[in-house]
Amino acid sequence: MATSAWQMPSILRAFSGALALLLALPGSPLHGQDQAEYPAAPPADSATPAQAGVRDDPCSYLNATRNYCTNTRRVTIGWRLNIEAEQDLLWRMITRNPKARIGWPAEFEISRASPGSKTLVLIATQNSPVGSTETEEDASYRGPDREAGEATGDMIDIGELDDPRLADKFDQALQNLIRIRALGLLSSQLRRGAFALCLERVDRECPGEDGSDFAMLRPGEEARFGLRNVADPDTAGSRPDYVYVLMVTPDNQVRVILTPDDAGGQPLAPGQIAINRQETIILQEGRTRFFTLLRAAPFAPGVIVRDPTSGQRTLDCSAGREPVLCSALSGENIALPPAWPTGPVHWTMAEQSVIVTRKQQYAAGGGRTAKAGFAPWQAQIFSNQTYSKKQIDEDTALGPKGKMLARQTDYQRYHRCGGSLIAPGIVLTAAHCVAKGPTVEGGQVLRTREVRLGTQDLSQPGAVYRIAAVVVHKGYRTNSQRDDIALLRIVPKVGVAPQLAVRLAHEVPGFPRATPGAPISVLGWGFTGVVERGERHEMTQDGPQFAVARLQIADLEAFDPAECARIPGYGDIFKTICAVTRSDRQDRSTAFSCRGDSGGPVIRQRGVQIVQVGLVSGGVGCGAIENGQQNPSRFVDLALYGAWIEGAKKLVRSLNNEVRPFP
């Protein structure tokens, strides 16, 4: 599976020689590389778009209050390889907007909504999407869910590729994302109040204490939202505040759903609750954000107005009042962080979210399709040695004892393992994926294996990389899962994918080990059918199975290592995480890793933070139940290999066309 080499769009040739040279480097801002090794995108003022249609200065609407929009930086936009054929269109669309620039690392990427789709979406790349999977109806609640300064946003539809208004729709989508980002940054920088969001439904009032359980909401359900002051009245510094709640819907409409009028015109004291019983909110699928503003005094009259058509309340920013808040709501303030005035701001704000997604649909093996953009660091290791027609015919003649090559697509025939990008040009994988022993295979793996990045769908092209060097743990032995870890140095062969590395356990100080019961998830394109002990992976009692096209994610929990060691076939669990289906799973199927997942990442999520804690090594069969106990999946415990990984990184960067063991 190959893609044509990247060609420079004609518009680039009009730029200066220096800029053209920068864009011609392997780390082209179009697809990008990590800033640590490759040049960053050009400064925002280094390239003035020549196209017509560029709007006025983004801060002109502030008139006399232009100081609220200083130190601006354009929003950096990139795009996925699945839309590369339209790069000239994307270049024109992005550069006509004065708030955007093309570069890498990108805050947002443009992608097709799904393989082959004509619909384009903007995806935030600096935190994970709402959820990791494609789902059916369900809802969950999140409080503040990112560190200060991170961009927020999930996925916003832009429009169809052949829509003549696509550029205008992109402008609107970008404005919505800038609005969310600015509000989120305000919430990050200012004091959080001790307030809990609550809701009333037809059959349930706001609870008497604390906040509400949002676990059973459904799209289209009617609800009324309120706010409770849960501060301890006896705590020093607690005081009543005038409260306002802004709601940003999944389609990015801004409403004021709670004001002091809903509390009798008074500040909300500890223990009190304010409910807007005049307006009913119809819950939409996606993330709805709630921004709680706390003020020592109410807004001046006329700041909160009611739309005469819809009857909904909103802020009137036309008179220049409340410039800080109005600047954020405008979707025009591209300061990072916002250059707010140094004088006193007489209010603070906190953010909460209600997220409506869909119930998880489990595949036979317990996995489900990962959301687009969830794992940009996911790598595929595949064979570049194609089968001849004679070999396929010979395999067919073997019947059930063969690999069923004639029934497989190309990506299924040649898929071998998973991996993860852990640094620019460095992929982490299992040793058994690239070596039969620390000194065996030599240059063979360098010749017969390649790496693909930039796609979660193996039926779609990605960027192909040559393996330039391999470092294998010296303790690894053939047919053993001890020290089953290796690093690859890769160099571009066809195309260049974004170099978004996953963080490893040892790189995050204080990140918890995957102790028994800890929730973890495994990603891969491997087999999804249960394999009993002694069965062939390719041909089980349920029939043949092959690699899947779309990246799967399965939720497991770490299993007691002492119990794991007592299961036949698991005696040596040195530096291993054993994992089984989560105890809170709601259906009766099992979750597991299997053949084709080897070397792929095992992650743990804490809020929006994603950390790789393991890599797939093996197991006995795949997910089978024996004597009432699931045969665990086995993962390398990366928390115990931090020093080895750092040393192996240095070594593999110094090698060329070589496979070498490392202690």
Image: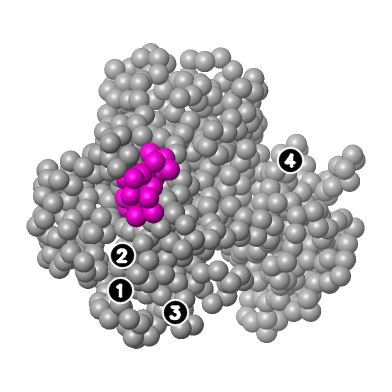
Residue 240 shown in magenta: no
Q: Nearer the viewer, mark 3 or mark 4?
A: 3
Question: Which stretch did the figure color magenta?
Answer: 395-424
Coordinates of residue 452 in the picture (x, y in percent) = 33, 42
Residue at 86% from the left image edge and 70% from the top image edge:
203
Residue nearest the observer in this picture, 142 or 100: 142
- Left or right for 33, reference 232: left
The residue mark sitting in front, 2 or 1, is: 2
**Residue shown at 88% from the left, 62% from the top:** 277
Circle number at residue 576: 1
The answer to whether the residue labelled 3 contacts the one labelled 4, judged by CB atoms less than 8 Å apart, is no
- Per the model, the C-alpha gap separating discs 2 and 1 is 9 Å
Q: Amino acid at mark 2?
A: Ser
The answer to whether marks 2 and 1 mark residues whose Cβ atoms lie closer than 8 Å is yes
Residue position marked by numbered label 3 in the rendering: 626
Q: Earlier in the sequence, mark 3 or mark 1?
A: 1
Secondary structure under tag 3 reads strand
Mark number for residue 617?
2
Disc 3/disc 1 C-alpha distance (Å): 21 Å
Quick check: can you spot residue 508?
no
Classify residue 283 as left or right of residue 603. Answer: right
Q: Position of residue 551 (x, y in %)?
A: 46, 50
Q: Which badge, 3 or 2, is on the more N-terminal residue?
A: 2
In depth, the one of 394 and 590 nearer the eye is: 394
Residue 485 vertical position relative to residue 330 in the rendered view, above or below = below
Q: Earlier in the sequence, mark 2 or mark 1?
A: 1
- In three-dimensional space, the C-alpha distance between marks 2 and 4, rounded to whole angstroms, equals 58 Å
* Quarter where residue 60 is shown: top right
